[in-house]
Image (cartoon, helix red, strand yellow):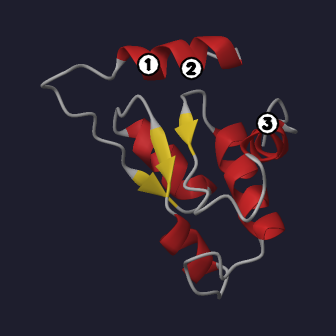
Amino acid sequence: MADQADKAELLRSLHIPGAPLVLPNAWDVDSARAVVDVGFPVVATASNAIAAALGHDDGEGAPSEEMRFVAQRIAASVDVPVTVDAEAGYGMAPEELVELLSRDRSRRL
């Protein structure tokens, strides 16, 4: 499932009233692949775990470039939708943040 629109539609379809969607959190490529390998249809990134793995505090304590890099690597490593915990957006307009997160998504690891 490589198409971004297909991934977005799958993510939308999993939001069912009365049936909570469980989003396991990943902090790197290996943990994202493990989430998929056990059968979850979506991977979520965890800002706290990613920031800690990079040696920074959560709450936008990690440089946005480093956080985006990890999120992009995670998204490129799996064929399921990936949600990104982008804190408060690092001061970016929503459109700018989406554009930055969307770059290089087709690159495979």
Q: Position of residue 106 (x, y in %)?
A: 82, 29
Residue 102 against residue 69 in the figure, above or below: above
Mark number displayed over residue 8:
2
Distance Cα–Cα, label 2 vs label 1: 6 Å
Distance Cα–Cα, label 3 vs label 2: 13 Å
Rendered-image quadrant of the C terminus: top right
Mark number displayed over residue 108:
none
Q: Identify the secondary structure beneath mark 3.
A: helix
Q: Determine contact: label 2, label 1, CB under 8 Å.
A: yes
| Quadrant of res 91 | bottom right
**Label 1 Cα neighbours within 10 Å, binned few <14 / some 14-19 / many ≥20:** few
Evaluate whether residue 59 shows in this view.
yes
Q: Identify the secondary structure beneath mark 2.
A: helix
Mark 1 lies on residue? 12
**Label 2 Cα neighbours within 10 Å, binned few <14 / some 14-19 / many ≥20:** some
Q: Earlier in the sequence, mark 1 or mark 3?
A: 1
Mark 3 lies on residue? 102
